[in-house]
């Protein structure tokens, strides 16, 4: 009997699904949306920036846990020292408190606070979000006109957040791909936009930009069944 080869997309999604088992109600703080230290060689940040981002994520998560415990579910994702906060907190005041905690972490340049004042999401919802993230990443890998490693992908309650240093064409293309993934309700872009010339010159060796990346919600993103 012949064995059928799995597509690259299927393999990537299955690998993403394996992360679901790591989810636990006892671990409400999520760091970075990815395993620490992965994709360093192919990332568009400098190696120093990547290590710095990992440190920011760990320090921020630790301080949030120390001060708020399990009452919140916060995802901490840092890219080029800009921190994205997603998840749920009991009140809007708690969301502001989390933001101030993170702003106090060494080397944080800015914070994008998209925390929702609502009960913590269920394990089922978080598992589904992990699966969606895997599907989006797999779709980027399968796209022949994108560098998948240029993007960080975070999913929260079916909303996909995209981070990275990308050209306008790459941003538009990635948004279109993410929007087409089944289950995605909305796409939020937290990109640092670079020019095609910057990309050709090897922008990663340039100094870290001093202004935060703009946050845009994809107006064309619609709920999908």
Image (cartoon, rainbow, N blue to C red):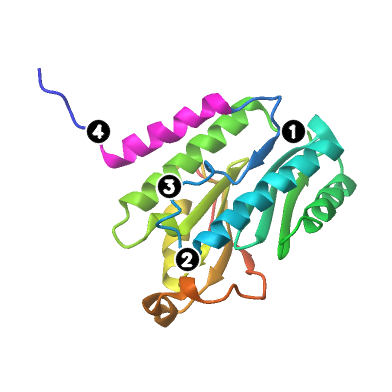
Q: Residue placed at 86% from the left, 39% from the top?
A: 67
Q: Which mark is residue 63?
A: none
Q: Which residue is mark 2?
A: 171
| Residue projecting furthest to the front | 48
Q: Which residue is mark 1?
A: 120
Task: Identify the magenta region.
Answer: 7-22
Q: Does label 3 or label 4 sit earlier along the sequence?
A: 4
Instruction: Report how far apart the C-alphas of labels 4 and 1 lie in the structure.
Output: 36 Å
Q: Residue placed at 53% from the left, 24% from the top?
A: 21
Q: How busy is the neighbourhood of tag 3: few (under 14 within 10 Å), some, or many (20 plus)?
A: many
Q: Residue placed at 57% from the left, 44% from the top?
A: 33
Magenta span has 13? yes
Instruction: Report how far apart the C-alphas of labels 2 and 4 lie in the structure.
Output: 29 Å
Q: Is residue 106 left or right of residue 49?
A: right
Tell me the chief SS of the magenta region: helix
Q: Which residue is mark 4?
A: 6
Q: Does label 1 or label 2 sit earlier along the sequence?
A: 1
Q: Which residue is mark 3?
A: 137
Q: How busy is the neighbourhood of tag 1: few (under 14 within 10 Å), some, or many (20 plus)?
A: many
Q: Residue placed at 51% from the left, 76% from the top?
A: 206
Instruction: Report how far apart the C-alphas of labels 1 and 2 lie in the structure.
Output: 30 Å
Instruction: Report how far apart the C-alphas of labels 1 and 3 lie in the structure.
Output: 25 Å
């Amino acid at each position: 009997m012949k064995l059928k080869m799995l597509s690259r997309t299927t393999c990537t999604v299955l690998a993403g699904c394996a992360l679901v088992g790591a989810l636990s109600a006892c671990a409400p703080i999520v760091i970075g949306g990815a395993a620490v230290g992965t994709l360093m060689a192919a990332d568009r940040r400098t190696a120093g920036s990547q290590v710095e981002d990992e440190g920011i994520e760990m320090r921020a998560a630790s301080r949030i846990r120390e001060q708020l415990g399990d009452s919140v579910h916060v995802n901490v994702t840092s890219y080029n020292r800009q921190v994205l906060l997603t998840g749920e907190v009991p009140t809007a005041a708690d969301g502001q408190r989390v933001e101030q905690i993170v702003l106090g972490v060494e080397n944080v340049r800015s914070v994008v606070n998209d925390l929702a004042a609502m009960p913590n999401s269920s394990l089922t919802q978080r598992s589904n979000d992990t699966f969606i993230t895997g599907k989006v990443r797999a779709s980027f890998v399968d796209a022949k006109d994108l560098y998948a490693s240029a993007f960080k992908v975070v999913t929260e309650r079916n909303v996909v957040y995209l981070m990275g240093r990308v050209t306008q064409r790459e941003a538009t293309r990635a948004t279109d791909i993410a929007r087409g993934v089944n289950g995605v309700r909305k796409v939020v872009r937290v990109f640092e936009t670079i020019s095609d010339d910057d990309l050709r010159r090897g922008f990663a060796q340039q100094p870290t930009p001093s202004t935060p990346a703009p946050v845009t919600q994809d107006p064309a993103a619609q709920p999908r069944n």
